[in-house]
Amino acid sequence: MPNRYARPPIIEAVISIQFADEIPVRSREKLKDRLKKDYPNVEDIAQHQFGFGPGHYVFSPPTIIGHKLLSTDLLNIIMITPKELIISRLSPYAGWEDLFGKGQQVWSIFMNVIGRKIVSRLGTRYINRIDIPSTNESEIDTTKYVRIGISVPNHQALEVYNVETVFPLKKKPFKAVMRTSTVKSPLIGYSSIMLDLDVYINEDISQDDADIWNVINSFRDLKDELFESCITDRTRELFNRAKN
């Protein structure tokens, strides 16, 4: 989203690169070791499996399937899973150029360590939290803040609001997933609406490095346009209030 708002609502920005085939375990370990210099806080991603037996549960020991690496300030995150590489930034958002640049740096290391993998999906995801002065989230009229949702009789506020939709964008073959819901706000005296936008491509992807990053860079304008089309002027007023 354009950096013109005094209070930008982004709580996490993500670049996602998915692969057609799994990254071997040893290769994931090597990549983790190469990235630890800039992302020294490392957490394992474990998969827990359980089943049902006659009259009892059967639990298997957790299996390590990937790694989560965080920068010293815990704001920049890399996730390495069997079929996905994720580069993300938490609030305060430092801008698209910062996220894009870090993504390219990590990709360069990925290519040096692991080499060419067939890319099956490229995406960028922005999770936004719209903070609204209110002490009761069930009292929020969501239609005043986002242009996504359902109509109810007599314009009543919704006690539970949770919508997800998937659709193609005008610029083919790009698509989007939009998720929005009411959530508890971490701010006293506020309630919040979550607006989660995922712009992606999963077909006709060139495997050339320059083309891959040109596509990723094109997500910037697409997600900005989508975000602006989802919010109302009342929401923009909230973003433009002076910072406390």
Image: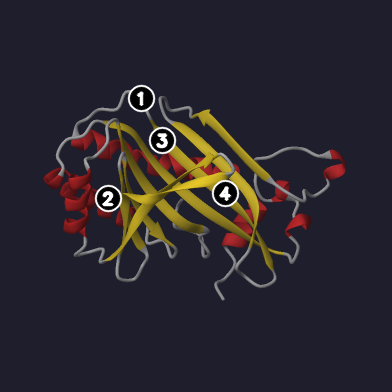
**Is 125 situated left or right of 114 in this image?**
right
Secondary structure of residue under mark 1: loop
The CA span between labels 3 and 4 is 16 Å
Q: Earlier in the sequence, mark 2 or mark 1?
A: 2
Q: Amino acid at mark 1?
A: Glu
The CA span between labels 1 and 4 is 25 Å
Q: Amino acid at mark 2?
A: Gly
Which residue in the structure is indicated by mark 3? 200
Q: Kindly give the residue lying farthest to the left in the view shown.
A: 112
Q: Quadrant of residue 238?
A: bottom right
Disc 3, disc 2: CB below 8 Å? no
Q: Earlier in the sequence, mark 4 or mark 2?
A: 2
Instruction: State whether residue 231 appears in this view.
Output: no
Residue 103's tag is: 2
Secondary structure of residue under mark 3: strand
The CA span between labels 3 and 2 is 16 Å
Q: Residue at x 37, y 65 (%)?
A: 75
